[in-house]
Image (spheres, coloured by chain):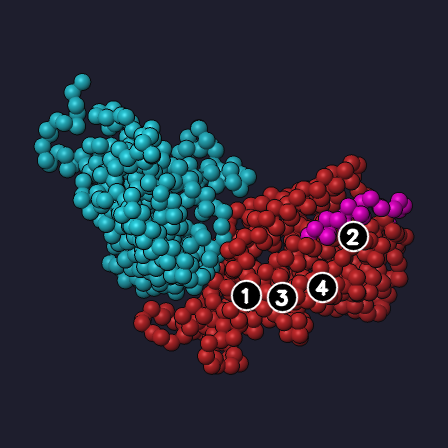
Chain colours: A red, B cyan
Amino acid sequence: MTTTPPRDIPEFDVDPTLYRHLADTQMNVELDTGDMILNIGPQHPATHGTLRLVVRLDGERVVAADPIIGYMHRGYEKLVEFRTYPQITTLINRIDWLSSFANEVPFIAAAERLMEIEAPPRAQWIRTTLTELSRIATFLLFLGEMGLQVGAITPAFYGFRDREYVLNLIEAVTGGRFHPNFNRIGGIKEDLPWGWIADCKQAMAKVLESCDTFEDLVVGNPIFEQRTRSIGIIPASVGASYGVSGSNLRASGVDWDLRRDGKPYLPYHELDWKVWTHPDGDSFARYWVRLQETRESARMVLQLVDGLPSGPIMAKVPRIIKVPAGEAWINTENPLGEMGYYVVSKGATGPFRVKIRSASFSNVSILPWVLRGVFVPDVITILASLYFILGDIDR
Amino acid sequence: MTDLLALDIGWGTTLGIKTLVVLGLVPMGALILGYTFLLKMMSHMQSRLGPMDPGGFHGWYQLVGDGIKFLQKEDIMPERADRRVFALAPAIVVLSTFLVFVVIPAGPRIKVADLDVGVFYALAVSSLSVIGVLMAGWASANKYALLGGLRAAAQLIAYELPLVLAVVGVVVQAGTMNLNEIVVFQRDAEIFGWGGIGFPLILTQFIGFALFMVATQAELTQPPFDMPVAESELVAGYMVEYTGFRFLFFFIGEFGTAFAFSGLAATLFLGGWAVPGVEGTAADVLGPIVLFAKVMFVAFLMFWARFTYPRLREDQLQALAWKWLIPIALVNILATGVLKVAF
């Protein structure tokens, strides 16, 4: 099955407000061979949040799809202009709420670069550990969730169960399961608790085991393969032109990972790890790549806790943080893709302007392209395989 | 001891008792399957507890409580719905389940109706539910429900054929369409002269049994064939606008039909109520127990698949039915016929 539509389809640059209006008012139950407009969301189990998709259907085939975002806009880019730097981590925690520790890192790194201070090695290693842990937590949820969207209920529970081990680790260090608010400019808030490293190794063994389970249960399932193979193919060039990033792009065969290829922001170059890619670019590839990355992250965490350097966890920073005037752009490889913070400072206690580049926003922008010509059930699998977080789209 | 079943209590009373039994069986079966498999087995497979508190013992009261909750709920009908069709649809779905129960024998004399075309009748009335589902999908004035209803219709029609063809082998071998006589045949036949367990037809009709189970799964709209309800895409498909009591009807229909089809499979392939060597009143007492055990076993297989597999897509499901199940079923019938003539 390709994404080529069966017949000539009208171009999608018809005024989208028209669809919105039709979807709200038209109740089309007559025997009508015309296109049906199906309104998926903002309350729909597959959009995990408040994404709205207005889909024009010919039978069950999608003629055109239009994602409507903004139901969860919270205005973080504006809000942070009225906060001091240490206060901002609380807000940006809530952007991609599943991996909030990874959200804090690029912003803190940008502020540190402007202030020209560097966190001590131990702080950097702990940051890396927690970033990878939050990546594992996010991906474990994805691995289960994808099964749910394809119709199998059981993997979802396995995903939630195994994520709990990782969340417990994050909670033990930071005190928060979802919103750690743990990064400080120049380091981190506290050191690791006693006995944590042993727990961490144990939990990583469980994560690796759980990855094997998912490989057996989901990837090895013939129905799952039938439902995801060659569905929702995103060629590398198209994906790159829409700004798709992270695992979604790596699943299209692009060997590009900011942890390795970007400007160094955490000590990833000291670890022995591999960037996984898959040549196909379909939903299956996206699932497979994330599965391998979960494993890779678990191995990275094991290396990180083994080689943890000693020393202080905070650099010397003034009591009242004032960031010198200047601009900094830091982009990092977050679980959902490339996340970037462009921070403009005018020398005050808070930033003058912050632009947040969030991964999911670009990842869902490809939906109108990729959803053309697929069937309704595939809309759901493609949505699930792109793996977006609503907070990350709307900010 | 007086043989209770031989008592002449009059035509009207007999009919009344039979009606009550059938009316009671459907919700009873739905409750048993719902509790054992939906609440307990599924929780076990997914490494969670499931409800444990209501009723004291492992939350046995949970489903009854759920039922009472449904009775209290507001009965909401969409403004644009076709009111009469909308109200009638759940009743038709449950009705088809009731009608299947009529012909399944639970003992040599414990049977509601002894039809000579029992197999034919059971498969025919079980497909009545398609009409109810289609009515529900159509009358709800909801696009999700419409998609669900149409999917259900396409799917149930496609799977009616393998279901019937899978049973033909049994009918050919037993030489009758009367369900009770099929059971008697399985009790009295021997495996190469040894009659210890009778001759459950699954021994020769294992392909038929496998086809029957797959087609049943599609008839019941259970995963991997649950596209009509597909909660992750169509929310609840044709049931999406139903609340309260009407929703409960669909629920009872779903699990009651699972119970009925398990009963059919147990009767046709596993020997039904038959216990070789036991005759008379003892068979009437043992029969229902044996049948129930077999029903639970078949239902276990059904729900095991239900909680394990993801969902196929509608076109993949049609391809499976027409390209695989039906040809295999036809070959099975041919082979059965040839072997029947040869031996």
Q: Could one spot residue B96 in this view of the protein?
A: no
- Disc 3/disc 2 C-alpha distance (Å): 30 Å
- Disc 3/disc 1 C-alpha distance (Å): 10 Å
Numbered label attached to residue A280: 3
Q: Which residue is mark 4?
A: A339
- Disc 4/disc 2 C-alpha distance (Å): 16 Å
**Could you say where residue B135 lies in the image, as x and y percent from the top left?**
29, 59
Labels 4 and 2: the sequence-earlier one: 2
**Could you say where residue A71 lies in the image, as x and y percent from the top left?**
55, 64
Q: Nearer the viewer, mark 1 or mark 4?
A: 1
Give the residue at x 88% y 55%: A318
Give the residue type at disc 2.
Thr
Numbered label attached to residue A231: 1
Q: Nearer the viewer, mark 2 or mark 1?
A: 1
Label total for image: 4
- Disc 1/disc 4 C-alpha distance (Å): 26 Å
* Whether label 3 touches label 1, CB < 8 Å: no
Q: Which residues are magenta?
A: A294-314
Say whether residue B55 is left or right of residue B265. right
